[in-house]
Amino acid sequence: MRKSRLSSYKQNRLIELFVAGATARTASALVRVNKTTASYYFLRLRQLIYDNSEHLEMFSGEVEADESYFGGTRKGKRGRGAAGKIPVFGLLKRNGKVYTVIISNAKSETLLPLIREKVCPDSIVYTDSFRGYNALDVSEFKHYRINHSELFADKFNHINGIENFWNQAKRHLRKFNGVPKEHFHLFLKECEWRFNHSNPKEQLLMLKQLVKDKTN
């Protein structure tokens, strides 16, 4: 961005359109720049978000845990028939922030260390009935699980918050008609950032400050 030939006005307009969730194609038409230029600028904004992603404090209290699969050409059960899909694990502190990470698989030996790394002992962890969370039953956490084959919520026992985040993230990514795997980590952190800072004015100020810091 330090070497960008775009005027300050056009850069600010691109930042505003990025915050608004516009695609690079739409932004290029509105700002009157080449689509490749808009795409590259948006990618640099995502890289800035990724490089400055928050080191969130450990979650405590009530925390929802879930995994999801992104991309691919066909649906499949958890870990099965997920050809071409990218597995992602997420933690959400109720009435708080979300944390996401790309995982190699959804086995207990993968998920439990991630939970221990980000969640304080004795916290309440809510999950669905997926077997990958069985280890939580004999861990330092209080574990509640909801069986989605029977119901989606039982009073306080649910994972509606993290599932709402997955839905928001997939709805945002769908407009791009496919995200290159090599850049998926950038798009994922963008979705996390948008969720954790839901006020567009706050997003705009944060992003302009990141660009300013980068160019100084």
Image: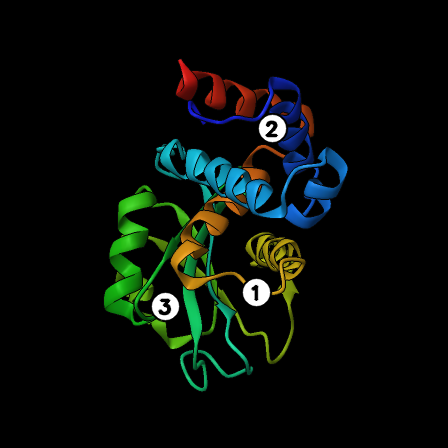
Q: Which residue is mark 3?
A: 133
Of the image marks 3 and 1, the number of the one nearer the N terminus: 3
Q: Are marks 3 and 1 in contact (CB under 8 Å)?
A: no
Q: Please report the residue visible at 69 percent of the width from the left and 35 percent of the height from the top.
A: 17
Q: Please report the residue visible at 43 percent of the width from the left and 33 percent of the height from the top.
A: 48
Question: In terms of depth relative to the viewer, which is nearer, 123 or 76?
Answer: 76
Front: mark 2 or 1: 1
**Does residue 14 appear in the picture of this structure?**
yes
On screen, residue 45 versus residue 198, left or right, reads left
Q: From what the image shows, is residue 33 above or below residue 102?
A: above
Label 1 sits on what residue type?
Answer: Gly
On screen, residue 80 versus residue 154, left or right, reads left
Q: Which residue is mark 1?
A: 178
Residue 54 position by quadrant: top left
Residue 8 position by quadrant: top right
Q: How is the image coloured?
A: rainbow
SS category of the residue bearing label 3:
helix
Q: Which residue is mark 2?
A: 203
SS category of the residue bearing label 2:
helix
Q: Residue 90: x, y in percent? A: 44, 54
